[in-house]
Image: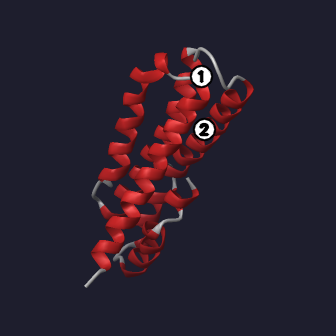
Amino acid sequence: MWWLYFSAKHEAASEHFAQADDPGAMARRAYTYTPILVVAGIVVTAVGDELSLVHPLGHIAPTTALVLIGGPALFLLGTAVAVFAVWERWPWPRLIGAAVLAALAFATPMLTPVALAGAATTVLIAVGAWETLRARSAEAP
């Protein structure tokens, strides 16, 4: 989550604000309500981590699955809304990552809590890698 939040987009947003005609309006759109979604995603993910550490094996309760999937999805959606507020275009890797997390719900009967937590973490890593590689290929001559 740290990687995704403080990615190249975070640095580019600062530059984008500096060049904007109305940086105040842009900052209000990007930083007034979207941090609530991002922080909520981080907190829900922490709860999911705790649940998966307390009961790492066995059956996944529906509430545990919701927390393990919902926290990372909420984080990705919150950061996607923040990116949209700045550049007025959707960051597809983050939206696709959230959709993949939602699809993990169908795999929960076959997974243990720790495996589901690992799968959700893998999705976050994949989104971070996708955006990092895409940014590097855009910078390449």
> What type is the residue that disc 2 sits on?
Thr
Q: Which class describes the residues within 10 Å of circle 2: few (<14), some (14-19), or many (20+)?
A: many
Residue receiving disc 1: 64
Disc sitting over residue 45 in the figure: 2
Q: Measuring 48% from the left and 48% from the top, which residue is drawn there?
A: 124
- For residue 77, above or below residue 137: above
Q: Position of residue 137 (x, y in %)?
A: 29, 73
Q: Residue at x 59, y 46 (%)?
A: 39
Do the residues under discs 1 and 2 have CB atoms within 8 angstroms? no
Q: Where 2 sits versus 20, above or below?
A: above
Residue 100: percent from left, percent from top: 37, 37
Rendered view: 10 above or below 84: below
Q: How is the image coloured?
A: secondary structure
As helix, strand or loop, the secondary structure at mark 1 comes to helix
For the residues marked 1 and 2, what is the alpha-carbon distance in whole angstroms?
A: 11 Å
Q: Which quadrant holds residue 47?
A: top right
Residue drawn at the location 53% of the way across and 60% of the way down:
3
Q: Residue at x 44, y 57 (%)?
A: 128
Estimate the x, y position of residue 120 in percent, counting from the top left: 50, 38
Q: In the image, is 35 to the left or to the right of 98?
A: right
The residue at the far left in this view is 141
Quarter of the image with the C terminus is bottom left
Looking at the rendered structure, the secondary structure element under dot 2 is helix
Q: What residue type is disc 1 on?
A: Thr
